[in-house]
Amino acid sequence: MSKIKVLLVEDSPVAINIYEKMLSSSSYIEVIGKAGNGKEGLNLVSQLNPDVICTDLQMPQMDGLEFTRQIMAHYPTPILVLSNSVQKFDIDNIYEVMKAGALDVIAKSQTASGDNSESMQNELIVKIRVLATKKVSAIPLA
């Protein structure tokens, strides 16, 4: 069975490294590309053709919401949003990104110690494995 190809779009190099480590622990997943913002991510999607995209919401040049809209309009791909902006109380952000076409969200850990990292790693791997099985349709830009 071929590995699930994942593109990471995140402006924090630290977060990118953490996610890449988490995902590389799974024999089912391969990180095929990394982008520091939505514009870079958009360029990589057409070249790499990932199975799943993980994106942050708050990024320079093109944020995760606009990135999600562009991906779903031009390269429909399952998207998982990993962000501080999708905590349980961020209903508006979650609603907007889901409406734009993201399939799921994971709130980044609010603890600096990262003691939740193992449970987040498990959640991340499980969600990516599930999202990779989903077919998504284009959502035209309004």
Image (spheres, rainbow, N blue to C red):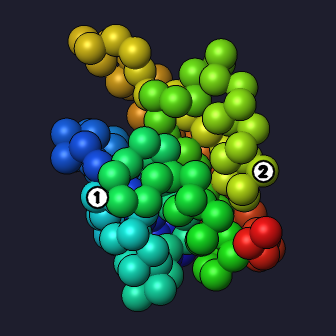
Left or right position of 51 against 22: right
Residue at the spot 33% in from the left edge and 44% down from the top edge: 19
Left or right position of 112 against 8: left
| Residue lying furthest bottom | 47
Q: Residue 67 carries which label?
A: none
Q: What residue does disc 1 label?
A: 36
Q: Where is residue 113 in the image (x, y as percent from the top left)?
A: 25, 12
> Neighbour class for label 2 at 10 Å: few (<14), some, many (≥20)?
some
Q: What residue does disc 2 label?
A: 99
Kind of residue at badge 1: Gly
- Dot 1 or dot 2: first in sequence order is 1
Is residue 128 in view from this perspective?
Answer: no
Residue at the spot 28% in from the left edge and 58% down from the top edge: 36
Kind of residue at badge 2: Lys
Q: Nearer the viewer, residue 52 or 73?
A: 73
Could you tell me which secondary element the residue under label 2 belongs to?
helix
Name the quadrant containing residue 27.
bottom left
- Quadrant showing the C terminus: bottom right
Q: Where is residue 108 in the image (x, y as percent from the top left)?
A: 44, 28
Is residue 68 in view from this perspective?
Answer: yes
Q: Where is residue 94 in the image (x, y as percent from the top left)?
A: 68, 35
> Neighbour class for label 1 at 10 Å: few (<14), some, many (≥20)?
many
Name the quadrant containing residue 109.
top left
Q: Which of 38 and 5 is in front in this view?
A: 38
Is 73 situated above or below 12? below
Q: Position of residue 96 (x, y in %)?
A: 71, 43
Residue at the spot 60% in from the left edge and 45% down from the top edge: 127
Name the quadrant containing residue 9.
bottom left
